[in-house]
Amino acid sequence: MTPPPLPPLPLEIPQITSYMNPVLAFALLEMAMENFKQFLFALSAAVTVGFVSIIFVLRWVFYFKEGLAWDGGLAEFNWHPVLVVTGFIFMQGIAIIVYRLPWTWKCSKLMMKFIHAGLNILAFIFAAISLVAVFDFHNSQKIPNMYSLHSWVGLAAVILYSLQLVLGVCIYLVPITPTYLRAAFMPLHIYSGLFIFTSVIATALMGITEKLIFGLKNPSYKDSPPEATFVNVLGVLIVIFGGIILWIATRPSWKRPSEQVLRSPPTNGGGSVGIKVSQQTDPIDPKGNGDARRRSGKLEDSGQVN
């Protein structure tokens, strides 16, 4: 009787350390990523769709509209869609997934926190300027403010985003913040980040639809003139970009490896220690508490959706 085959041995790779040759370290990072080619494809698709969306919104305001200016007229209003798509959508999306880029894993966690916070602050500045442009245009043209659902949801998203920034900086970048507070706040930080990002995309779709309905007269929006079709495609691109970002941000196997895996020095006389690929990333934690890790006996917090 033939004995049953033995189970396959787990694939092991050398441990990634800061002492390795950069080329070797990068190769190991590729091995550590489950379905790395899929991640690279998703990332390339997100960046490509994001850039195309920015090109589309610029084409819209320069070809179909009055261009850009700061004179209280329609050209000033055009800053609103440009800054929202560029900053509030594209930059915020990149900020959400920046921890998951394998090329950043050799950077310290503190540096990545500053990069994550910097991108979000820049996105908030773009969003704030876009709001100033809208209110200034409305006041100059004697148009009422805050009467549409688009304006309600949009202002709420900006306010929530500002609170997210303040709390994130105070909790994760101020050294005196208790570690238990960082761990407790992390699930809410992750959820609110994704919720705000999704809300911004929904608000943008409402906004461009509202602009087309009010702005197109002869021919009207229902007649599907070239501008309407062009801007509808812009809306589809924004949805695709948001969907890809959310997909990248919610894949547990694409998380940044733990700091112990990335930073622990080699042992056994300087040799590399074999570790399982499955240990490169943290186990799935449905409550999000896995982002708080033990390092040197202290609880180390993690960044957003990392």
Image (tube, rainbow, N blue to C red):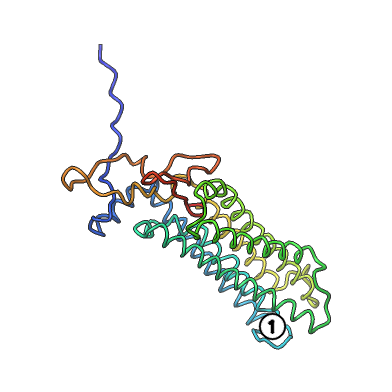
Question: Which residue, given by chain and number where applicable, does mark 1 sit on?
Answer: 76
Q: Residue at x 49, y 56 (%)?
A: 176
Could you say where residue 20 lies in the image, as x and y percent from the top left?
23, 55
**Image vertical order of residue 269 relative to residue 64, above or below:** above
| Number of numbered discs on residues | 1
Is 37 displayed left or right of 54 in the figure? Answer: left
Could you say where residue 46 lies in the image, as x and y percent from the top left?
50, 60
Q: Residue furthest bottom?
A: 71
Disc 1 crowd rating (10 Å Cα; few below 14, some 14-19, many 20+) is many
Is 199 displayed left or right of 15 in the figure? Answer: right
Q: Residue at x 36, y 46 (%)?
A: 296
Q: Residue at x 38, y 43 (%)?
A: 297
Is 137 displayed left or right of 277 in the figure? Answer: right
Q: Quadrant of the N terminus?
A: top left
Is 127 displayed left or right of 107 in the figure? Answer: right
Q: Residue furthest front?
A: 176
Q: Residue at x 42, y 59 (%)?
A: 110
Towards the viewer: 8 or 62 = 8
Q: Amino acid at mark 1?
A: Glu
Q: Quadrant of residue 101?
A: bottom left
Could you say where residue 274 lies in the image, as x and y percent from the top left?
25, 41
Q: Residue furthest left?
A: 269
Q: Quadrant of residue 218?
A: bottom right
Towards the viewer: 232 or 275 = 275
Towards the viewer: 30 or 164 = 164
Does dot 1 land on a helix, a strand or a loop? helix
**Image vertical order of residue 203 relative to residue 299, above or below:** below
Could you say where residue 233 lies in the image, as x and y percent from the top left?
63, 66
